[in-house]
Amino acid sequence: MNKPKIYIKEKYWSAEDGFRYCETIARSHYENFPVASHFVSKEIRKYVWAIYAFARIADDYADEPGFTLAERMDNLNQWEQYLDECYNGNPTHRIFAALAETVERFQIPIELFQNLLTAFRADVTVKRYETFEDVLAYCRNSANPIGRLLLLLLNYRSETMMHLSDSICTALQLTNFWQDVSEDLQKGRIYFPLEELEEFGYSEQDLFNQKVNDHFCNLVAFQVRRTAELFVEGKPLLTMVGKDLSMELRLTWNGGMKILQKIHKQNYDVLTKRPALSKLDKLGLLFRSFLS
């Protein structure tokens, strides 16, 4: 694989140059859940692309092969400098030219993007979480800003809706953790709280040895139940938003719950087989989301 590009300052770019570039990035990446799909109106789609491109590149700096640890942190620091320039009215990168128009039009606070960068830095430097509260703190930076950003793009600004969105987004992030246990182990990461590993009589070494036993399955079952409760806690948001977001949100909510169901059906063994949505599952989710 070619080494990912390290971004440097560029010439002046117009917002439209930036939006076209962001669209290219969005369309070239696969995600578990829809990104700026046809269920999002054309009026805001380009703004979703801008936010996605900001997060996608930063995530690549944190996770993609080809960087040293120092390069990862330098690139994320540079990305934050671009962000500051964007908010100061002087964007010097195509993505941030698009982002500048986005944040001005929708009055988006810089803290949401700073939180994302905090999470990406944690991806580089943090491999263990002592408590569940520590995991939730990571989710508050990594996942919750995405939901809040989408709500702001559609002019939903009530704190009640923001908190419901936080519950769904945290649940989605946790679902991704339980879905990708094996993949994260390859990167040396454990998202099960260490105090809960001990509580369930399961060790880090057991995990790296891919040991599936009752202790492990009980641990995963506990995480799945707690994650499902967060999905249910956030579910009222599905009926509070309008048609501009309802289909996207129902698909995302149903998709996350479906993954949890799959983990349950395989007796919580997420080490032997990674639970994933099949084409048939996705078709069923589409019908269910239309009917709900």
Image: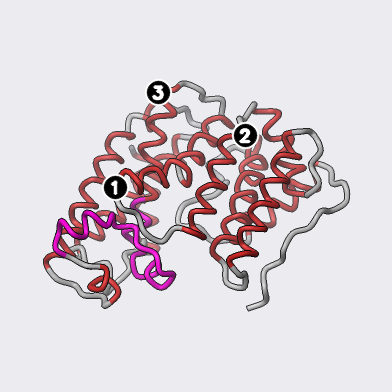
The kind of residue on which mark 3 rests is Thr
Left/right placement of residue 109 relative to residue 221 reads right
Question: Is residue 131 rendered to the left or right of residue 148?
Answer: left
Queried whether the magenta region covers residue 182, the answer comes back as yes
Q: Are marks 1 and 2 in contact (CB under 8 Å)?
A: no
Colour scheme in use: secondary structure
Which stretch is magenta?
174-201
Please tell me how crowded label 2 is: few (under 14), some (14-19), or many (20+) other residues with Cα within 10 Å.
few
Nearest the camera: 211 or 167? Answer: 211
Give above or below for 62 relative to 105.
below
Q: Nearer the viewer, residue 239 or 160?
A: 160
* Residue 264 percent location from the top left of the image: 20, 58
Between 269 and 76, the residue placed more toward the observer is 76
Q: Residue at x 23, y 45 (%)?
A: 226
How far apart are the two marked residues, 1 and 2, measured between alpha carbons?
A: 27 Å
Query: Most prominent secondary structure in the magenta stretch?
Result: helix
- Give amino acid for label 1: Phe
Query: Circle 1: is it few (<14), some (14-19), or many (20+) Cα within 10 Å?
Result: some
Residue drawn at x 73%, y 46% is: 82
For the residues bearing labels 2 and 3, Cβ distance under 8 angstroms: no
**Residue furthest right in the image:** 11
> Which residue is disc 1 drawn over?
132
Q: Which residue is mark 2?
A: 110
Q: For the residue labelled by badge 3, is the local secondary structure a helix, a strand or a loop? A: helix
